[in-house]
Amino acid sequence: MKKVLYILAIIIVIVGIFLALRPRVATSNDATNDNKILVAYFSATGNTKSVASTLAAATGADLFEIVPEQPYTSEDLNWHNDKSRSSVEMGDRSSRPAIASKIADISQYKIVFVGSPIWWGREPSIMDTFIESYDFAGKTVIPFATSGSSDIGDYGANLQALAPNAKVLTGKRFPTNVSATELKTWADEQMQ
């Protein structure tokens, strides 16, 4: 009987932890709060999605996926091909790939973490589309990135140029296996 109660207690604790740490999806029904946090991300292969989900759970942030209107195929992402969609977009700084959905009310967020992979030494062009689609005046924008080898480069400076009335921080690149503890510690430092 003790074993059954012990196992039941462990299951309850695990379920409680899971429920407490799961990210909330951004909706237009959320109440306005001057301290609300948003994690917005673009992920072509799932690596950035993993980090973004962990960051949202660790910070209690809402989560918004930046989905391209025209999804990227593996051929589109072939950086060895100069004519692939991603190569063409990244070669043209004015390229602005369309985004499939919008955040209903970005004004409710004070802090916005913005994440993506690093392509050709910078953020993908769809991130520029995202930043130019909203008014970030008075908000703190904190970039984060995933990459197999590139650092975050000028991600923050590039976003600052697109959102001059926001406070855009330098940001950081993370490996896909970054822990929730490391992300929480970093996020807390950035939000001070």
Image: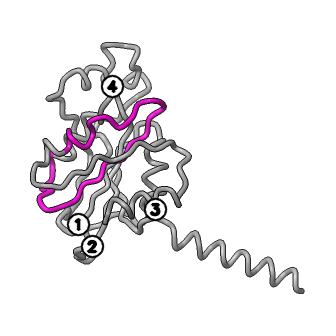
The part of the chain drawn in magenta is: 132-159
- Residue 121, given in percent of the width and then of the height, sits at 33, 28
Helix, strand or loop under label 1: strand
The local crowd at label 1, few if under 14, some if 14 to 19, many if 20 or more residues have their Cα within 10 Å, is some
The residue that mark 2 highlights is 35
Find out whether the residues at labels 1 and 2 contact each other: C-beta distance under 8 Å: yes
Q: Residue at the location (53% across, 61% down)?
A: 181
- Residue 8, given in percent of the width and then of the height, sits at 76, 80
Left or right position of 76 against 100: right
Q: Tell me the amino acid under the disc marked 4.
A: Trp
Q: CA distance from mark 4 to mark 3?
A: 28 Å
Q: Residue at the location (26% across, 51% down)?
A: 169
The residue that mark 4 highlights is 120
The residue that mark 1 highlights is 110
Q: Comparing marks 4 and 3, which lies closer to the viewer?
A: 3
Checking the image for residue 184, the label placed there is: 3
Quadrant housing residue 154: top left
Magenta stretch holds residue 156: yes
Q: Tell me the amino acid under the disc marked 3.
A: Lys
Q: Residue furthest right?
A: 1
